[in-house]
């Protein structure tokens, strides 16, 4: 029985930690949980091995045995503050002997008796155990003093219930045996006035940092998000990603560039001026950069790695994938394949046997037909799953949904129907789509939810490979039918009741427009002819993204006749927003009920002549932001519709055919900023003056800009870890913007220094971002690329990376020079500023003889992380006795800056104190 006890003792700890983790409320406790998981896992593996040896399967015996049990209980933390949650773990020394992973018996009728300081009692439960014979609950004391807790087990006969479909009843020899009642020792909880606090988390980084992020730095989640690219940009073609999610391009888990500092550039196809006989005018003089219908770039970012399709020419001639380091642009691997990247996935797999995320890439093979008018990618309906670290293929999911496409009057083909991709709380790749077939029990089109993880686990079960859902094991080389992943199917409404009571057929059928706040916004816009004009009404309905049931509608919403509408949605405030292009006005509706919240609110800008033609919108930070072809950006209050601010690109004169600088894409919102990209891909394809703008989301004030030309009619960017990736049609290069690392040097004369002779300290501060080592940069700056001021950043970056003239008014950055003298005094000698070459100097006269350590410090800026360097010199006495140079009298200690060291001590208690590992859910 000893192995059985060992398994129970260690295994129940693992189960308790997993359960408590789900219920916890303190973010800081996650660090402790991650530290001890490996230890417990090793113990668990050893213990389970002993159990398998000691307890072979056999038939039940006669007469049945009576097995003594021993009950245990722990309460954590102890003491605890009044009104603070205490976590109670209780278990038997005997795990249910037939328990096998998620199968087998569990113990029942666990109760916990609580006696309060005033003598009153209450009973918690009954509870059912987990597979390891334990359970848990929480308790919030409301009195000061001592509480007592006693756990009781009423006894139970093993039934052999819930057998494993793979091996049947595990340890069937115990079926019919009676496990006797037991009661734990009394546990006393001390309740005090002051709450128990947690150690503070490590602060967010102020220095240059890289991936991976240490698990100890759990609060870095707020700046360490990924970019999975669930929705393709660019007219349905996409190059592997485009949007942060299916709601909008808003990444709330990252910092974002405050200046135009460039980390690196990398070509994604030939670009820029062709030269020779193709020159002399704007029209026809550059390499192809019109990527509306044949997009060339779309990014996925996972764990600091950027993935994208390489499309140097036509989309019919794909050239594989590239995986780059986000911070350096260096190639990690390339993959020679015709498959086209579609999205990333992070499965956060939590089970009693393992937890943590697995990163994957999903791709589709292109169809042989490019016969649509756009020429964009069409796909075959086999979804391919790849490992994100190596790019190696894992499995295929075959027979995905398709939709017919008319190639010509004699040829119609079926191509892959691309679902609305999303993820659930566990990161599983979810796809929502409409099956327009009526050949089903409802005789109506259906709304379908598909789950990639469900498909894989179902396949493993049905093929006999594994029925153990406690371990994630995607079968290598498998071909899995799409249908195994269908989680639910719900019929869609086909008729709506008009205000006069008549029934009107919804035509065309409802389709998915937006996904936000666990609601699928379904719309149908009747069109006149082949245009997007609607006849004065649209159909709308809201369906649950959780189980597919109808939440509201369908309704027939009145619209202005012969106009076009676009939709924006947000998961932040449960609203969706409708823009009427011709009237240039917004309305807001509840995505939960479909009811009008506000509007219409007209923009009322007579100067915005082209604004009706094309818009791009995002909702973030309580605002609804829109850019348009007229060169304007509007910030509206998302709750009231009030116009907060307006930004304009200004008069363009003859630089563009429009008289202004058009804006085609509001690319992304992040870190309190929005990034808007200029340009328009027609008549002519390129013109001077298109810019990437960074605007303050609260005020609309421009923070920075830099030349950049839009490549598609939809956002095509990616941002994570504080680095913005933006393709640029001016040269067909990918630009990475963000804060870069710096390097400071310092020099002092080695000899001849006295207390009466001035000494000149010199050095440099240079930019050591990866781009500084690119050939065109390093050749022009062999002594290092200088760091310059934030105010000079845009023109300096233009000159360094974009072949523009170098301005003659570039300013440098401040450098502080301090010394540690022979008396141990640390003091500042002064502050100087680098010149346009990154060079600085400061002259100072030593005032006492002896050794000096000199420190030059660049504190950092919005463009660069800080850096420092040291040197030393010796100052001899001048030979003349002289009073020290007069200084303001101060106490010696207060006269100098002290250098302090902060020590962080982390203590980890492994025993039953691990029940403290209840995680607080992020708000």
Image (tube, helix red, strand yellow):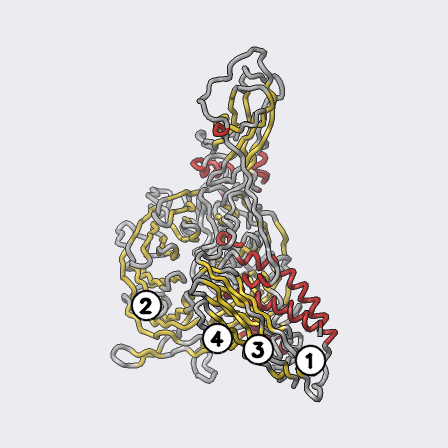
Instruction: Please state which of residues 779 and 81 is positioned toward the viewer in this rendering.
Output: 81
Which of the two discs, 1 and 2, labels the residue nearer the N terminus?
1
Name the residue that disc number 2 marks: 534
Q: Is the C-beta separation of discs 2 and 4 under 8 Å? A: no
CA distance for labels 4 and 3: 13 Å
Which of the two discs, 2 and 4, labels the residue nearer the N terminus?
4
Instruction: Please state which of residues 202 and 747 is positioned toward the viewer in this rendering.
Output: 202
Q: Is the C-beta separation of discs 2 and 3 under 8 Å? A: no
Q: Badge 4, how many Cα within 10 Å: few under 14, some, many 20+? A: few
CA distance for labels 1 and 2: 68 Å
CA distance for labels 4 and 1: 33 Å
Nearer to us: label 2 or label 4: 4
Most extreme residue toward the front is 119
Q: Position of residue 369 (x, y in %)?
A: 54, 66
Q: Position of residue 837 (x, y in %)?
A: 52, 30
CA distance for labels 2 and 4: 64 Å
Name the residue that disc number 1 marks: 171
Please give the count of numbered marks on the rendered protein. Answer: 4
Q: Is the C-beta separation of discs 4 and 3 under 8 Å? A: no
Q: Badge 1, how many Cα within 10 Å: few under 14, some, many 20+? A: many
CA distance for labels 2 and 3: 68 Å
Q: Is residue 325 above or below residue 26?
A: above
Q: Is residue 642 above or below residue 136?
A: above
Which of the two discs, 4 and 3, labels the residue nearer the N terminus?
4
Q: Secondary structure at mark 2?
A: loop
Which of the two discs, 2 and 3, labels the residue nearer the N terminus?
3
Name the residue that disc number 3 marks: 153
Q: Is residue 227 visible?
A: yes
Q: Secondary structure at mark 4?
A: strand
Name the residue that disc number 4 marks: 123
Nearer to us: label 2 or label 3: 3
């Amino acid at each position: 029985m000893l192995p059985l006890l060992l398994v129970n003792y260690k295994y129940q700890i693992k189960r308790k930690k997993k359960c408590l983790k789900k219920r916890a409320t303190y973010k800081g406790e996650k660090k402790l949980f991650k530290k001890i998981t490996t230890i417990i896992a090793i113990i668990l593996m050893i213990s389970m091995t002993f159990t398998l040896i000691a307890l072979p399967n056999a038939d039940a015996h006669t007469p049945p045995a009576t097995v003594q049990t021993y009950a245990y209980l722990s309460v954590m933390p102890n003491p605890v503050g009044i009104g603070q949650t205490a976590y109670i773990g209780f278990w038997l020394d005997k795990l249910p002997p037939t328990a096998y992973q998620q199968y087998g018996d569990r113990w029942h009728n666990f109760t916990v008796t609580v006696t309060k300081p005033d003598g009153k009692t209450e009973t918690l439960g009954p509870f059912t155990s987990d597979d390891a014979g334990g359970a848990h609950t929480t308790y919030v004391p409301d009195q000061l003093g001592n509480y007592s807790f006693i756990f009781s087990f009423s006894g139970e006969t093993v039934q052999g219930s819930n057998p494993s479909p793979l091996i049947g009843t595990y340890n069937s020899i115990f079926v019919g045996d009676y496990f006797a009642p037991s009661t734990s020792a009394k546990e006393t909880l001390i309740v005090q006035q002051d709450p128990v606090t947690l150690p503070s988390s490590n602060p967010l980084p102020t220095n240059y940092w890289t991936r991976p992020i240490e698990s100890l730095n759990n609060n870095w989640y707020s700046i360490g998000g990924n970019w999975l690219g669930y929705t393709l940009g660019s007219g349905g073609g996409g190059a592997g990603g485009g949007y942060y999610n299916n709601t909008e391009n808003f990444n709330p888990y990252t910092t974002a560039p405050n200046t135009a500092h460039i980390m690196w550039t990398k070509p994604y196809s030939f670009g820029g001026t062709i030269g020779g006989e193709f020159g002399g005018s704007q029209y026809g003089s550059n390499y192809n950069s019109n990527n509306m219908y044949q997009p060339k770039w779309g990014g996925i970012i996972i764990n600091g790695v950027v993935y994208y399709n390489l499309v140097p020419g036509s989309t019919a001639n794909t050239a594989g994938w590239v995986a780059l380091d986000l911070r350096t642009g260096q190639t990690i691997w390339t993959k020679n394949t015709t498959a086209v990247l579609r999205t990333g996935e992070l499965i956060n797999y939590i089970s009693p046997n393992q937890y943590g995320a697995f990163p994957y890439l999903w791709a589709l093979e292109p169809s042989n037909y490019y016969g649509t008018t756009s020429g964009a990618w069409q796909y075959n309906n086999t979804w391919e799953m790849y490992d994100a670290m190596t790019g190696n293929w894992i499995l295929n999911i075959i027979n995905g949904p398709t939709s017919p496409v008319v190639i010509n009057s004699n040829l119609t083909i079926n191509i892959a129907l691309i679902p609305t991709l999303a993820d659930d709380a566990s990161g599983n790749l979810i796809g929502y789509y409409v099956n327009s077939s009526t050949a089903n029990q409802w005789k109506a089109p259906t709304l379908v939810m598909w789950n990639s993880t469900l498909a894989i686990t179902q396949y493993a079960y049905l093929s006999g490979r594994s029925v153990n859902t406690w371990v994630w094991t995607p079968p290598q080389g498998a071909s899995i039918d799409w249908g195994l992943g269908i989680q639910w199917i719900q019929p869609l409404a086909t008729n709506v009741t008009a205000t006069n009571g008549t029934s009107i057929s919804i035509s065309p059928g409802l389709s998915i427009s937006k996904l936000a706040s666990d609601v699928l916004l379904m719309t149908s816009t009747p069109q006149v002819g082949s245009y997007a004009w609607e006849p004065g009404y649209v159909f709308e309905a809201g369906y649950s993204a959780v189980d597919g049931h109808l939440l509201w509608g369908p309704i027939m919403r009145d619209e202005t006749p012969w106009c076009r509408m676009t939709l924006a949605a947000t998961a932040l405030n449960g609203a969706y927003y409708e823009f009427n292009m011709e009237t240039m006005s917004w309305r807001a509706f509840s995505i939960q009920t479909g009811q009008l919240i506000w509007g219409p609110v007209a923009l009322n800008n007579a100067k915005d002549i082209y604004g009706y033609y094309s818009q791009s919108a995002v909702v973030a930070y309580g605002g609804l932001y829109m850019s348009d072809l007229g060169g304007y950006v509007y910030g509206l209050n998302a709750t009231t519709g009030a116009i907060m601010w307006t930004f304009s690109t200004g008069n363009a004169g003859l630089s563009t055919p429009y008289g202004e600088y058009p804006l085609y894409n509001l690319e992304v919102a992040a870190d309190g900023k929005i990034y808007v990209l200029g340009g328009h891909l027609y008549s002519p394809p390129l013109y001077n003056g298109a810019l990437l703008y960074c605007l303050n989301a609260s005020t609309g004030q421009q923070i920075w800009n830099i030349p950049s030309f839009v490549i598609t009619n939809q956002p095509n960017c990616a941002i994570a870890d504080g680095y913005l990736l933006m393709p640029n049609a001016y040269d067909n290069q990918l630009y990475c913007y963000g804060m870069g690392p710096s390097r400071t040097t310092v020099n002092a004369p080695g000899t001849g220094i006295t207390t009466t002779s001035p000494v000149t300290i010199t050095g440099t501060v240079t930019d050591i971002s990866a781009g500084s080592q690119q050939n065109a940069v390093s050749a022009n700056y062999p002594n290092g690329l200088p760091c310059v001021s934030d105010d000079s950043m845009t023109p300096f970056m233009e000159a360094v990376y974009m072949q523009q003239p170098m301005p003659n008014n570039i300013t440098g950055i401040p450098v502080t020079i301090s010394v540690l003298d022979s008396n141990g005094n640390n003091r500042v000698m002064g502050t100087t500023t680098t010149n346009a070459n990154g060079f600085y100097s400061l002259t100072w006269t030593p005032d006492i003889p002896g050794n000096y350590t000199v420190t030059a410090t660049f504190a950092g800026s919005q463009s660069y992380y800080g850096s420092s360097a040291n040197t030393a010199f010796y100052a001899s006495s001048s030979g003349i006795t002289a009073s020290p140079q007069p200084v303001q009298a101060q106490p010696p200690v207060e006269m100098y800056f002290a250098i302090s060291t902060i020590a962080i001590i982390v203590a980890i208690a492994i025993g039953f104190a691990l029940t403290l590992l209840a995680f607080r859910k992020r708000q």
